[in-house]
């Protein structure tokens, strides 16, 4: 017999396999944590710095699953009542409030996290610590844009006709840009009319409105856009990779938000989840992440600002407080209507 | 005799595993989606109603997106047919060696990941991409053309990506046509074109319809290609469903949009099937 496995064996084997895959996750891997992360820079930096640190400290392994904040909420919502699909969530401010409202994440027990007390007070969230601040500004190609831009208004210059890139409201980047335009035009989170009015006048200059973050970065790489909104970390990482790109803050104040980490409600490995989040707060980890090409803004009092973070974002913790913040609770209330209006206004 | 009869009467049991699979992983989720679409509020607090459907139909933007999507499918499918038919016809007329080369080229698009293929198209269609560089170098246009983030770009990419779904059924049907029929036609004095329109084209109709159904449904639902090549300024139904379900967590509305989209596509497919039945009845009946 050339084939030593009989039909019966094969059937039994595949049935067993099928049965195994139907079991909830975590039945076999005793010491495996599942943590959500963002795509791009975040997936890279956490894989390279956080995962090894965590494994060394806890003896466990971690599977890092890159997901948009909104996708994390969707998965947690879908799994509500059953075993959680992952143990640690990573969210921006708006989605974090939504997750708290929907009862998807647990209160953060500081007693289980020795590094938590080492954070600046504004980063010690009740439901989870802020692990960084994300800031946005203008990124441009220094080969094609000779005068460095200084404010959002530069995006409206006639010379940039068909060369500007922004993203849709699906990313916090696109949302924060629209909110800031609105603020400068005299609107509030309760009334976005000024922003949409202003956005309309930007249309001739737009080369692209990316549906997502990954596509937005690719457009800078492909010289498809010469100038546009961009996140500080992503711009600097592209630059470190050799893409001709420069990041500048806008003169009207830098829109910024906290990015937080949470232990999800019903986490299968709560202790490992705490160890993982705490590792992200460790001074060693935050110091390593502050180095180029990552330039992650630290939230720990024990990590002084250095390098590009110090030269472009903040020299002292007070500099962070001077940034522009939005009322994310109100933003969450308006987002559905704004998305539909955004769809309408930017349609070709 | 009796044994054979029992055997025959039990043959349907072979379909049981697939039926169970479909019921569990297709019918049940579909029913769930339909159920959710009747939830009156975003939070799904239990009240039922047609609110979501009313909200969709009450906004002209949504209806425009639906028609845009259905028309996008028509354009890409037509292009697939126009390019695919000669290719399939050629296939039936070349040596076996060339046939395997052709089939390899036809299948090639399906063996690479759709994301990879689409990113490759971004490079090709971009402002500084191969196509635009050539156009500018040849002096056909002073400025690079807007291919990326335009409907033309989406149609071009969909045509390449979905081509196998059109060509493979066409090849199957064209190969089955008796070559004697064409010979008889020309012996009776018909020219090449007349033979094509009177003999080959009508006989290949089942392949055209099958290919059209497959290509059309794949084109209108091609989320990755539509969103990456089209960008956010071109909105199609799959992206709208994604926005509602994932970005905004409005599952009842997303479900209603899905049901409306599904029914629209099913109606078009039903129309094509009816068309092919009518054809078949006239040809063979």
Image (cartoon, helix red, strand yellow):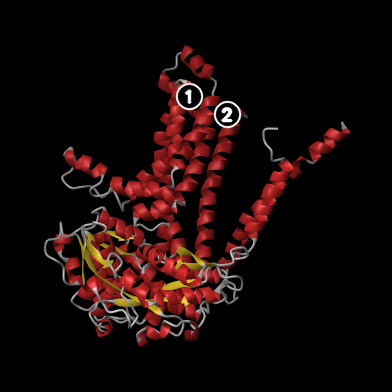
Q: Tell me which residue sits at (56%, 73%) in the image.
A: A269
Displayed quadrant of residue A326 = bottom left
Identify the mark nearer the N-term, 1 or 2. Answer: 1
Residue A69 place in picture, x, y as percent: 43, 69
Instruction: Using the image as rendered, state which of residue A286 and residue B11 is in the foreground.
Output: A286
In the displayed structure, A188 sits above or below A51; it is below
Residue A242 in view: yes
To which residue does mark 2 refer? B283
Q: Nearer the viewer, mark 1 or mark 2?
A: 1
Residue B204 place in picture, x, y as percent: 51, 30
Instruction: Using the image as rendered, state which of residue A229 and residue B199 is in the foreground.
Output: A229
The chain under label 2 reads B
Displayed quadrant of residue A38 = bottom left
Query: Which mark, by number, is residue B242?
Result: none
Residue extending furthest toward the bottom: A121
Q: Tell me which residue sits at (46%, 25%) in the image.
A: B99
Residue extending furthest toward the top: B187
Crowd band around label 2 with a 10 angstrom C-alpha radius: few (<14), some (14–19), many (20+): few
Residue A283 place in picture, x, y as percent: 36, 77
Q: Tell me which residue sits at (40%, 81%) in the image.
A: A329
Determine contact: label 1, label 2, CB under 8 Å: no
Query: Which mark, by number, is residue B92?
Result: 1
In the rendered image, the quadrant that contains the C terminus of chain B is: top right
Crowd band around label 1 with a 10 angstrom C-alpha radius: few (<14), some (14–19), many (20+): some
Q: Is residue A131 left or right of residue A159?
A: right
The chain under label 1 reads B
Residue A115 place in picture, x, y as percent: 41, 81
């Amino acid at each position: 017999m050339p084939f030593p496995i009989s039909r019966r064996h094969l059937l039994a084997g595949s049935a067993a396999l099928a049965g195994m895959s139907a079991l909830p996750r975590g039945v076999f891997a005793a010491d495996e944590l599942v943590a959500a992360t963002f795509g791009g820079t975040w997936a890279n930096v956490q894989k390279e710095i956080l995962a090894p640190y965590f494994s060394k400290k806890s003896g466990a392994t971690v599977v890092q699953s890159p997901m948009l904040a909104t996708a994390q909420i969707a998965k947690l919502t879908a799994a509500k009542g059953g075993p959680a699909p992952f143990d640690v969530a990573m969210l921006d401010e708006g989605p974090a409030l939504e997750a708290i409202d929907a009862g998807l994440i647990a209160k953060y027990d500081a007693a289980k996290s020795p590094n938590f007390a080492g954070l600046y007070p504004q980063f010690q969230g009740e439901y989870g610590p802020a692990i960084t601040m994300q800031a946005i500004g203008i990124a441009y190609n220094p080969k094609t844009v000779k005068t460095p831009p200084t404010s959002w208004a530069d995006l409206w210059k006639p010379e940039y006709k068909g060369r500007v890139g922004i993203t849709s409201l699906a990313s916090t980047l696109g949302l924060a840009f629209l909110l800031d335009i609105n603020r400068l035009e005299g609107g509030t989170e309760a009334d976005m009319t000024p922003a949409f009015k202003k956005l309309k006048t930007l249309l001739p200059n737009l080369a692209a409105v990316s549906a997502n973050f990954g596509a937005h970065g690719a457009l800078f790489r492909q010289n498809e856009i010469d100038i546009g909104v961009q996140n500080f970390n992503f711009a600097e990482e592209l630059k470190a990779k050799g893409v001709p790109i420069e990041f500048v803050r806008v003169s009207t104040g830098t829109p910024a938000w906290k990015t937080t980490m949470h232990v999800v409600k019903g986490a299968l490995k709560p202790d490992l989840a705490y160890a993982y989040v705490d590792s992200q707060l460790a001074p060693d980890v935050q110091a390593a992440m502050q180095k180029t090409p990552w330039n992650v803004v630290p939230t720990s009092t024990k990590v002084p600002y250095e390098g590009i973070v110090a030269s472009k974002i903040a020299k002292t913790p007070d500099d962070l407080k001077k940034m522009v913040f939005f009322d994310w609770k109100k933003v969450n209330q308006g987002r559905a209507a704004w998305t539909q209006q955004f769809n309408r206004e930017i349609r070709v | 005799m009796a044994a054979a009869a029992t055997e025959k009467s039990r043959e349907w049991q072979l379909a049981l595993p697939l039926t169970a699979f479909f019921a569990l992983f297709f019918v049940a989720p579909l029913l769930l989606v339909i159920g959710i679409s009747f939830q009156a509020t975003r939070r799904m607090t239990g009240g039922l109603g047609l609110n979501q459907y009313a909200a969709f139909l009450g906004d002209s933007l949504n209806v425009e997106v639906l028609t845009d999507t259905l028309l996008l499918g028509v354009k890409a499918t037509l292009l697939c047919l126009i390019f695919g038919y000669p290719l399939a016809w050629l296939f039936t007329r070349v040596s076996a060696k060339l046939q395997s080369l052709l089939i390899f080229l036809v299948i090639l698009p399906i063996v690479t990941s759709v994301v990879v293929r689409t990113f490759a198209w971004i490079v090709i269609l971009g402002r500084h991409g191969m196509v635009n560089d050539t156009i500018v170098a040849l002096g056909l246009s002073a400025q690079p053309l807007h291919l990326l983030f335009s409907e033309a770009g989406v149609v071009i990419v969909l045509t390449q990506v979905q081509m196998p779904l059109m060509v493979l059924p066409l090849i199957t049907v064209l190969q089955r046509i008796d070559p004697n029929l064409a010979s008889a036609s020309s012996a009776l004095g018909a020219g090449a074109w007349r033979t094509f329109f009177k003999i080959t084209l009508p006989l290949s109709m089942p392949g055209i319809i099958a290919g059209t159904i497959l290509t059309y449904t794949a084109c209108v639902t091609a989320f990755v290609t539509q969103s990456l090549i089209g960008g956010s300024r071109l909105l199609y139904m799959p992206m709208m469903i994604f926005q509602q379900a994932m970005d905004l967590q409005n599952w009842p509305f997303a479900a209603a949009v899905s049901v409306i989209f599904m029914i629209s596509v099913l109606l078009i497919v039903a129309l094509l099937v009816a068309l092919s039945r009518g054809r078949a009845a006239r040809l063979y009946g």
